[in-house]
Amino acid sequence: MSKKKIVVAFSGGLDTSYTVMRLANEGNEVYAACANTGGFSPEQLKKNEENAYRLGAKEYVTLDVTQEYYEKSLKYMIYGNVLRNNCYPISVSSERIFQAIAIARYAREIGADAIAHGSTGAGNDQIRFDMTFLVMAPGVEIITLTRDQALTRQEEVDYLNAHGFFADFTRLKYSYNVGIWGTSICGGEILDSTQGLPEEAYLKHVTREDESELRITFEKGEIVAVDGETFTDKIAAIQKIEERGAAYGIGRDCNVGDTIIGIKGRVGFEAAAPKLIIEAHRLLEKYTLSKWQQYWKDQVANWYGMFLHESQYLEPVMPDIEAMLDSSQRNVNGTVILRLRPLGFETVGVDSPDDLLKSKLGEYGEMQRGWTADEAKGFIKVLSTPLRVYYGIHPEEKR
């Protein structure tokens, strides 16, 4: 095999570690690139760099796309209150898209001949990486050793050990993907449809037993303050909310959904920040958006989330959907009050200058000021006309 310049999408896990070493040992010029969307700590990134060189990489680089991930994805998922199956914050799937875009961009910059990733043939990530690379780096070869050779974990571990690289790749009961928008949990009881996850499966545990209020302030749909503290850095605001909610063990659940390749999948997760932010934002919209704004925004937001999950972020309709979501937020301003408690929370209320509940025309269930009683009776009679016509002709169908 001729020597190639190859970029490896490097996470530091077993599959990508094997890929770096194997390709380097075969005489290739390997560039290990770790695309960080907010899930890696500085310590993890430092360890990744050290291991990449030990594995034989010519160069290692961290591609920090956390802010890009927020501006081009997370922001719109908040605008759209996006939860897959009304349950799961679309964390891993949306992260993978932006990691793949960053890797493809880097590969083009250095003139790489190929891009390699460690996905297997059984999941969604292979589709997200391959499709993004095919579009963003056309003509660049895609290498997937783990998938193409159907390698087992033990085969990969044995190869690394035989070539002097020893690391703890022990098969744990659970596997985790930690990100800014939640942590996914796979394995263990997740594989049994009759069981939920036990306490020890979660990375974050309840440390507060009291109740407290959390106040999130939005301007045009974006977080600008948490408990009165102003944030210009939206990632820092998300992290602050995560810290508050995680102390109560908020955001735990399991999601069952359909994978891109057509089988069912089940994943556990803990996502305090997304759950709190989305429910706070949804409540504020109930006060500040019209009925039809809410209705149509929900329709396109559902498609937006589905396209993100289904590896269709690059579909040309996505900017069109984003434009509508962005426009819908022009009056989504105010502070939302949440009450937090162990393993749960409730929405309390909002304080907004755009609160449509504060109408001079009337108070729901109390007093009308914008119409008379006779006008109300006339409106109701006209509204009932189509039904009176239908059942006048088909009286036997009355329920």
Image (tube, rainbow, N blue to C red):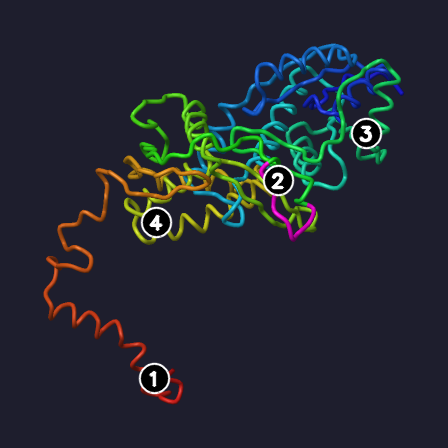
Q: What element does badge 1 sit on?
A: helix
Disc nearer the start of the sequence (1/2): 2
Relative image position of residue 381 (x, y in whole percent): 21, 75
Above or below residue 365? Residue 332 is above
Question: Which residue is at a point 66% across and 44% down the rendered structure image?
Answer: 190
Range of magenta residues: 191-199
Residue highlighted by disc 1: 391
Dot 3 surroundings within 10 Å: few (below 14), some, or many (20 or more)? many
Mark 2, residue position: 311
Kind of residue at badge 4: Gln
* Alpha carbon separation for disc pair 4 and 3: 48 Å
- Residue at mark 2 to residue at mark 3: CA–CA distance: 21 Å
Classified by dominant secondary structure, the portion drawn in magenta counts as loop
**Image quarter of the N terminus:** top right
Q: Which residue is mark 3?
A: 145
Residue pictured at 23% horizontal, 43% vertical: 355
Horizontal and vertical percent for residue 365?
A: 19, 60
Q: Nearer the viewer, residue 360 or 277?
A: 277
Q: Amino acid at mark 3?
A: Leu
Q: Is residue 254 above or below residue 373?
A: above
Which label sits in the foreground, 4 or 3?
A: 3
Q: Is residue 312 in sight in this rendering? A: no
- Look at label 1 and name its amino acid: Tyr
Q: Amino acid at mark 2?
A: Ser
| Cα separation between marks 1 and 4 | 33 Å
Residue underneath mark 4 = 293
The answer to whether 324 is drawn above or below residue 387 in the figure is above
